[in-house]
Amino acid sequence: MKTQVAIIGAGPAGLMLGHLLDLCGIDSVIIENRSKEYVIDRVRAGVLEQHVVDLMVRTGIGERLMREGLRHEGVYLAFGGTRRYINFVEHTGKAIWVYGQNEVVRDLIAAREATGRPLHFEAETVVVEGVDSPHPSIRYFHEGETHTLHADFVAGCDGFHGISRPMFPADLLRGFDRVYPFAWLGILAHAAPSSEELVYSLHERGFALFSMRTPQITRLYLQCATDDDIENWPDDRIWSELQMRLSTSDGWKPNEGEIFQKSITPMRSFVAEPMQYKRLFLAGDAAHIVPPTGAKGLNLAVADVRVLAHSLQRYYAGEGEAALAGYSQTCLNRIWKAQRFSWWMTQMLHKQGEGVDFELRRQMAELDYVTSSKAAMTSLAENYVGLDLDVSLPRKV
Ligand code: FAS
Ligand code: PHB
């Protein structure tokens, strides 16, 4: 088989890349090693930046998002028993949208299937060859047979644990890594959200985050130890800890309900440089990981593939290799700013030491400043809603 772009991975990066390439009239094949149900059911991100929402609407896959997504104009930061609101629209003119990654992936899969272009689930990529030549190929095992796909380019959208990044020559690839000394325990509960918008809370017992998925489902997280085990967290302990960390003196607290999903996620910052090796490109978590405190993971993945689709569109429009040269640095400029913001939100909101110590007092002072200074609120707001992304929308070549 032959295609123009072979895409490894059907997460947000791979699926969005396939969607954008299709709009440009560029052929692609998406190869995913997990099942369609697994990819859709994975519980992950929940917040979309304005540019992602605009992209989905303007490229024809935003109808359900507009109907079911929750538009939020800001967030609360809670500390010392009070909640303070940061109004994103007032400071930036932009909002954020709560719409689960599951739903984004569901919409992208439906769009891909409607095009009839190849999207292979449960297809194990066996080997990728020739990425240092103009004719790379992928051998994969699917439906009991081994297939060979010849392509002009390979897009490694296969996440942090995928096979693409390891294909870079060791003397080319540099990894920048920070592992945090805590993790997030996340739950989904059948409980009507008791706040219209998100609440990030610093408490002397640790961080907690109140979020949501629908008017009937609350999404909550609490800081736990990196080596903690979900078995240590029966439902009543989870609710007791969340109430202690989130409840504020004005009487607000999260509603409780049946917990139907719980998991522990480690926290890490990672960036791989560069993001291109000849005909192989990395996008999304294959190239970078952010701590979820800044709600950037999915949004960065979409930004990467917008740049990649635009570069490939220019390549096929006649600009050739020159159109691809800036991909890596264009993405990395934005990725490092998102890394900074995600690190900053994480260090400000997570308990670092034991008891009430210097660190906690410093964090409280930082939160007091950030929520009372117009300049500080504007800075937080413009990073949270997403920094500008100057990449034009796809158009048929
Ligand atoms: P993904 O990991 O989503 O997708 C990669 C795909 O490639 C997967 O489907 C995988 O099965 C497939 N693949 C891997 N190896 C392959 C191979 N050899 N052959 C074929 N396919 C292969 N972000 C936020 O913004 N907020 C959050 O709250 C948040 N929570 C998260 C919780 C968890 C547990 C995790 C792991 C991540 C979380 N993230 C969060 C980040 C997450 O949303 C990612 O940023 C997002 O999924 C990135 O999308 P992709 O780059 O497409 O990678
Ligand atoms: C979520 O709703 O899953 C969510 C929201 C904000 C974050 C992280 C996760 O920073």
Image (cartoon, rainbow, N blue to C red):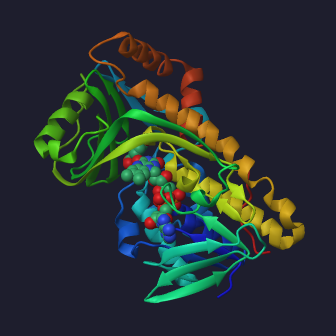
Residue nearest the observer in this picture, 165 or 356: 165
Q: Relative to 252, does residue 273 appear above or below in the rendering?
A: below
Residue nearest the observer in this picture, 124 or 9: 124
Residue nearest the observer in this picture, 155 or 384: 155
Residue nearest the observer in this picture, 365 or 320: 320
Q: Position of residue 394 (x, y in %)?
A: 72, 66
Q: Can the viewer see residue 388?
A: no
| Residue name at image x 47 percent, y 78 percent | 123
Q: Which quarter of the figure has residue 377?
A: top right
| Residue name at image x 56 percent, y 86 percent | 147
Q: Which quarter of the figure has residue 224?
A: top left
Please identify the quadrant where the N terminus is shown.
bottom right
List the single residue furthest toward the top: 358
Q: Position of residue 26 (x, y in %)?
A: 71, 77
Report the number of discs.
0
| Residue name at image x 13 percent, y 45 percent | 234
Q: Position of residue 298 (x, y in %)?
A: 51, 53
Q: Can the viewer see residue 211?
A: yes
